[in-house]
Image: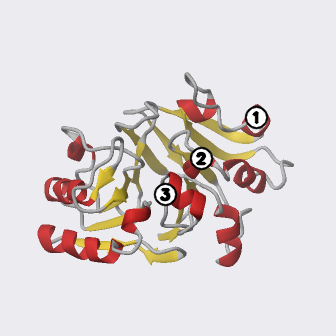
C-alpha cells in the first residue's frame, strides 16, 4: 500500500494563503481511495502524474471546504466524465444531506452519478473493495464529522483522525492501529477548539501505541516547525513520528 499526500496543510488560513497544499491524501492499494480532497487536489495530482480517473472511492469526513472542495471534480473523474455510474462516494451527513447551516457540499447531480453512496456515521462501517472502513467518533464544530479506520487485508490498520479535539476515551478508538494519521493544527500545547495540538498527539500515542504516527493538516503556526514537533513527539513517546510533506509518498 502507498500513502500519497496531495497536501500537508489544513485549516482556514493555510488553505486561503496556500502556504501548503491542501488536496488531502490517497490510499493506493487494490483500490485507490481519495480522502478529503480539499482545494488543489486535482492540481496536485497533475503535478504528481496521478490520473484522477484511477480513483475508486472519494471519502469526505465533514463539510468544511479544506476537506470537500475538489470532491465533485474527483467524482467526475471517477465516473469517467459522468459517463459511467461507478465508484463509491462516502461522506458525512453534513456533506451529503446537510445539517443546520452546513451543506450539502456535493450536488445531487454528482451524488446520483456514483455507483454507491454511503452516509457515514460514527460506529458504523462499510467496505471499499474488500477494505473494511470503520467510522470513528470525533468532537468537531461539524458535529457529523467522522474519523476513519481502514482495516486492510495485507497492510494492517490505518487510522485517520480527521479534524477533532481531544476528548476522554478518544485513544480507545485508535488502539490496534499500525499507523495513525493525525490532523494537527497547532504546535506544543497551543490548543484551539475542535482541533488537536502536538501535546494531544503525544498523549494519544502513549495510550494507543501505533507503530507509526504521521502528522499533517498543519495550520500556519505549525508550518515552519512541523519537523521539530515530530521529533519532539517521537522523543517523548518512543514511536516513530514523521511530519508529512506536500507530494510525499510513503510505502506501508
Q: Is residue 48 above or below residue 116?
A: below
Q: Which residue is mark 1?
A: 112
Q: Is residue 97 above or below residue 61?
A: above
Position of residue 161 in the picture relative to residue 93 (left or right): left
How many numbered callouts? 3
At horizontal 14% and vertical 53% (from top left) the residue drawn is 207
Q: Which residue is mark 3?
A: 10
State the CA–CA distance, disc 1 to disc 2. 21 Å
Mark 3 vs 2, N-terminal side: 3
What secondary structure is found at the residue carrying circle 1? loop
Position of residue 216 in the picture relative to residue 103 (left or right): left
State the CA–CA distance, disc 3 to disc 2. 10 Å
Residue 199 spot, x, y in % from top left: 20, 58
Residue 139 spot, x, y in % from top left: 34, 36
State the CA–CA distance, disc 1 to disc 3. 29 Å
**Residue reaching furthest to the top:** 100
Query: Are there few (<14), some (14-19), or many (20+) residues within 10 Å of tag 1?
Result: few
Q: Are marks 1 and 3 in contact (CB under 8 Å)?
A: no
Position of residue 76 in the picture relative to residue 244 (left or right): right
At horizontal 32% and vertical 77% (from top left) the residue drawn is 227
Which quadrant would residue 124 be assigned to in this image? top left
Residue 65's label in the rendered image is 2
Foreground tag (1 vs 2): 2
Which quadrant would residue 44 be assigned to in this image? bottom right
Q: Nearer the viewer, residue 91 or 30?
A: 91
Mark 1 vs 2, N-terminal side: 2
**Residue reaching furthest to the right:** 83
Q: Is residue 230 visible?
A: yes
At horizontal 59% and vertical 35% (from top left) the residue drawn is 95
Foreground tag (1 vs 3): 3
Q: Is residue 184 above or below residue 50?
A: above
Residue 68 spot, x, y in % from top left: 61, 47
Amino acid at each position: 500500500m502507498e500513502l500519497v499526500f496531495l497536501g500537508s496543510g489544513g485549516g482556514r488560513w493555510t488553505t486561503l494563503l496556500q502556504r501548503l497544499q491542501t488536496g488531502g491524501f490517497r490510499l493506493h492499494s487494490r483500490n485507490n481511495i481519495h480522502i478529503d480532497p480539499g482545494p488543489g487536489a486535482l492540481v496536485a495530482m497533475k503535478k504528481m502524474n496521478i490520473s484522477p480517473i484511477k480513483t475508486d472511492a472519494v471519502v469526505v469526513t465533514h463539510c468544511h471546504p479544506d476537506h470537500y472542495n475538489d470532491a465533485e471534480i474527483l467524482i467526475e473523474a471517477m465516473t469517467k466524465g459522468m459517463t459511467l455510474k461507478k465508484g463509491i462516494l462516502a461522506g458525512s451527513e453534513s456533506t451529503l444531506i446537510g445539517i443546520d447551516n452546513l451543506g450539502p457540499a456535493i450536488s445531487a447531480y454528482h451524488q446520483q452519478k456514483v455507483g454507491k453512496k454511503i452516509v457515514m456515521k460514527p460506529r458504523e462501517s462499510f467496505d471499499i473493495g474488500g477494505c473494511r472502513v470503520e467510522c470513528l467518533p470525533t468532537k468537531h464544530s461539524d458535529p457529523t464529522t467522522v474519523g476513519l479506520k481502514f482495516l486492510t487485508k495485507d497492510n494492517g490498520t490505518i487510522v485517520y483522525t480527521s479534524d477533532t479535539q481531544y476528548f476522554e476515551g478518544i485513544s480507545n478508538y485508535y488502539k490496534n492501529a499500525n499507523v495513525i494519521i493525525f490532523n494537527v493544527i497547532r504546535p506544543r500545547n497551543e490548543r484551539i477548539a475542535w482541533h488537536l495540538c502536538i501535546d494531544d498527539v503525544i498523549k494519544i500515542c502513549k495510550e494507543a501505541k501505533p507503530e507509526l504516527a504521521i502528522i499533517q493538516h498543519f495550520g500556519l503556526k505549525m508550518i515552519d516547525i512541523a519537523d521539530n514537533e515530530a521529533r519532539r513527539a517521537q522523543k517523548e513517546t518512543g514511536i516513530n513520528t514523521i511530519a508529512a510533506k506536500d507530494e510525499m509518498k510513503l510505502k506501508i
